[in-house]
């Protein structure tokens, strides 16, 4: 959902759990993203994805997870001004990908002691429809 505050666009993301099962959503203040100038596409990732974190896999820290109950909804705002500016560009398409954990993931803040393999085995990926900013 787009809104403009003090002349600047903001994007609030809504994630609905339409399944019959609880899932766990990565809580990342600054998600990974990549801008592809050639295709005019911005992809935003929440959670672990080889495309963006592959080189850092041995030291990747699994973000804290928040429970999302069946039929529940979670909202958060994308606040990185450079990212919001790129998403707001009318000639760019944006997609959001989220790796949801299907079971609770034990948290650790020690690099190399993360339950990354369990997270990858017990997760699924959801992707948004194309997001375009309409002024």
Image (cartoon, rainbow, N blue to C red):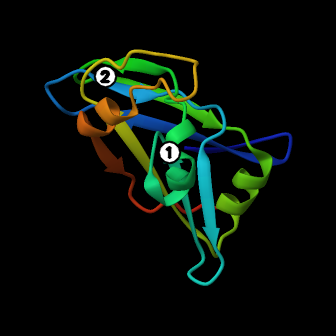
Quadrant assignment, res 86: bottom right
In the rendered image, the quadrant that contains the C terminus is bottom right
Look at mark 1 in the image and give the residue it sits on.
57
**Which residue occupies 66% across, 70% down?**
90
Q: How many residues crowd around disc 1 within 10 Å: few (fewer than 14), some, or many (20 or more)?
A: some
Q: Nearer the viewer, residue 110 or 83?
A: 110
Q: Nearer the viewer, residue 114 or 3?
A: 114
**Which residue occupies 22% across, 22% down?**
70
Looking at the image, the residue that sits furthest to the bottom is 38
Quadrant assignment, res 78: top right
Question: Which SS class for mark 1?
Answer: helix
Where residue 83 sits in the image (x, y, percent)?
71, 53
Q: Nearer the viewer, residue 78 or 53?
A: 53
Where residue 41 sits in the image (x, y, percent)?
56, 71
Q: Is 13 left, or right, of 119 in this rendering?
A: right
Look at mark 2 in the image and give the residue it sits on.
72
Looking at the image, the residue that sits furthest to the left is 20
């Amino acid at each position: 959902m787009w809104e403009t505050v003090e002349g600047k666009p903001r994007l609030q993301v809504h994630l609905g759990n339409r399944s019959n099962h609880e899932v766990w959503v990565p809580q990342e203040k600054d998600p990974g993203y990549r801008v592809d100038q050639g295709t005019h596409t911005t992809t935003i990732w929440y959670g672990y994805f080889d495309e963006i974190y592959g080189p850092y896999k041995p030291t990747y820290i699994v973000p804290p997870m928040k429970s999302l109950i069946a039929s529940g909804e979670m909202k958060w705002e994308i606040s990185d001004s450079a990212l919001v500016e790129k998403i707001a560009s009318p000639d760019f398409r944006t997609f959001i990908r989220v790796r949801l954990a299907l079971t609770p993931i034990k948290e650790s803040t020690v690099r190399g002691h993360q339950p990354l393999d369990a997270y990858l085995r017990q997760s699924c990926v959801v992707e948004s429809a194309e997001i375009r900013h309409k002024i």
